[in-house]
Amino acid sequence: MIRKVELLAPAGSMEALKAAIHSGCDAVYMGGRLFGARAFAQNFDEEAMVKAVRYAHRYGVKVYITVNTLIKDQEMEECLAYVAGLQDMDVDALIIQDLGLLDAVHQQFPDFELHASTQMHIHNREGLEFLKEMGIQRAVVARETTIEQIQEWSNIGIDLEVFVHGAMCVSYSGQCLMSSRLFDRSGNRGACAQPCRMAYELLHQNGQKCEVIRQKDAYLLSLKDMNTLAHIPQLLEAGITSFKIEGRMKSPEYVAQTVKAYREAIDTCLSKQSYTYHQEQEKELLKVFNRGFSAGHLFHSNHAQLVNTYRPNHMGIPIGTILSSTRQRMRIKLCEDICQGDGIRVIQEPEDYGCMVNRMYDKHNQLIKQAASGSIVEIEKSGFVVSGSSVIRSMDKKLMETVDQQIQHKPKRIPITMRFEMKIGSLAKLWAADEEGHEAQANSSCEVEKALRSPLDQARIIQQLSKCGDTCFTIPNMYLDTDEQGTMPIKEINALRREVLNALTNQRERRNGGRRTATYDRKAPAVTQERSLSVEVADEEQLQAAIEAGIQMIYTSRGDLVKKYPMVRRIHERVHPFPYSLQKQDAVGEVGGLLAKQTVSGEISLNVFNAYTAAFLHAHRVQSLILSSELNKAEVHTLIQEYQHRYHQKPNVGVLIYGRLELMITRYCTVSAILKNGQPNCGLCRQPGYYVLRDRKGRCFPLLHDEFCNTHILDQQPLDRIDELAFYQQAGVREFRLRFTLEDKQETAAIIRRYQQRLS
């Protein structure tokens, strides 16, 4: 049975919010000026947010606010005060990434609906079940989720919010460090610089031999945009709660056009009408923004189908070809209509050329405002263009005007029922109610009189009561009970209408009254405080070096090594399939592992950024934790001090002290996309050597591939913080992790020995 679903739209500005509402969304998600994962969107200050929430609620649309960044200890008090303000504003729900913040908000604001952000990377049944145990109402599942998984999870009892359209991160969400490492702009802090949209070469390194596989200026990590409009029936059958459209950085026109397309498709399917996806629908979406479209991981697009190596920005639609050019003009053969005010781009090497169509000429050299497909036109230009190049339209003026008119002149209206009573000798009464159960009533300030000459007829009463003006209401049902000889001043009828409509509006604007505020009361259990040097290995030679060096805590994500060497502890990473069998002291790297009934350790991918998260994890049998590598020395020290102050003991925390950071882990495989046309399990990564991405600055990022066909993009150089050991020891850090990836046995042994000597 298909149930009613929510269509959730992005709102990066007030204009985009209005576009979403009047195009048919059920809810919007947006960010404030603080703690949101789109720091460079326009976003909303406090005054604008109050207006936005009231406006949305007026039209029956819910508002979810993103608080989906990792929070530092020195920010937590401000963040919780911000959340208190959001509850007072009547925000419907929060979207949260940070585990410690999620726990604190859930305790302090027990009636506030909470959604686990996609940045939390919920990608398995265990993760969803853990969130349900916490009391979280909804999870935004990872973009790597498949339709079959959604079908399997729909009976868990937690709402599933699924991205169905828009930009896709190439990395597992919440696990990307590339922007942070290369540009000091953390994606986990809302400041992603989008290194995935930059150009790279693909190399193969085998010993001293390095071969260039794909030359520069290929956008090897730039995924196409997701578009699932052709799959709406399957998505509805799968049991999705909320269809989510990406795009808080996009224009109001993009929001309006995309919401409108999905609204019509969903409504068609829910009304049990036959649904057919037409290419014309896709064309309209291509016009507003696209990097090319795929159905994403949701519908098993292969690696080559997922990526657009050609361009990382808006591709528009092709409208013609350059025939020739002079210094001031370019001559174009059109395959689409074009008009003055359109934005166009010439796709060429070494650099595209873009401009607005300002002055356009026909074959008779006459200025024209528009031209039809098939004709030849000349357009004035200021840059260099190459004959034979394709021309795309990046901005469609007519479409933008049409969409703007739809938003301005065809606003959404809320139907209400109205009853008016006018009896001689009594006060007139007006009652109104909407379909959600809100109702209001008002009485006139004077009694109805018997008319001396002209009584007030019903047509005039209806005329006055129907004047809804700039309110959100329309009145399809109006009932009158009046004395034929009665009369009253028109201004009294107008006053009644205004009073009732204002009262209804105020009721609609306030949806979530009576929510409680409580006290944060997390108890942190006692944990061991042994100091240790731990090692993570990627191959058997490194493992043997660690064993020979006397290392007691050895970790690996490779199942074959764990079977062969029983003393080795398994790292259950965020990308491993479930179910898995956790052993005592195994390491977990994602939320699903917290369902474990035995003591485990916590990996760096749990994104421990503050004392609240550390306490939450310790309380869930995570005995030791590796802190996020995005924390600097001072912040690590602050976390330990804050933990000790708040919970009256020190946490058992560690740091990655040596090793290459995993900048990204991707389900998408560049190697397969380029060399095997996207074929899964192609086996190329099992050949001698390894592959490398090289950027325009010459920085090289090794690619490692695990047994589950995930790609691990490593930092160009390993961290080496041996000179910071003394500081961390004094601060109270208990575990020092060495991570080995490309090192041979001799290098591994030498590095272990160096750290053992410094720690002794």
Image (tube, rainbow, N blue to C red):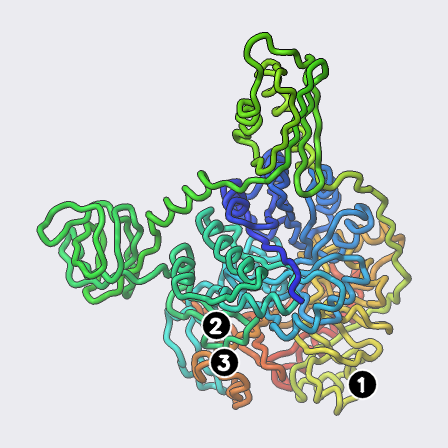
Q: CA distance from mark 1 to mark 3?
A: 31 Å
| Residue nearer the viewer, 222 or 242 | 242
Tell me residue 627's x, y (percent).
72, 62
**Does the rendering let one see residue 264?**
yes
Q: In the orientation shown, which residue stands out farthest toward the left? A: 364
Which of the two discs, 2 and 3, labels the residue nearer the N terminus? 2
| Residue nearer the viewer, 712 or 148 | 148
Residue 626 found in image quarter: bottom right
Residue 573 found in image quarter: bottom right
Query: Can you identify the residue that label 2 sits on?
Result: 306
Image height check: is 269 above or below 448? below
**Does the rendering let one see residue 45?**
no
Tell me residue 363's x, y (percent).
11, 54
The amino acid beneath tag 1 is Met
Quadrant of the image containing the N terminus? bottom right
Tell me residue 341's x, y (percent).
29, 46
Residue 601 found in image quarter: bottom right
The amino acid beneath tag 3 is Tyr
In this rendering, the label closer to the viewer, 2 or 3: 2
* Pointer 2 local density, CA inside 10 Å: few below 14, some 14–19, many at least 20: many
Which of the two discs, 1 and 2, labels the residue nearer the N terminus? 2
Q: Is residue 503 left or right of residue 408?
A: right
Query: Can you identify the residue that label 1 sits on?
Result: 567
Residue drawn where x is 49% and y is 84% of the image: 679
Query: Can you identify the residue that label 3 sits on?
Result: 691
The amino acid beneath tag 2 is Leu
**The residue tagged with tag 1: helix, strand or loop?**
loop
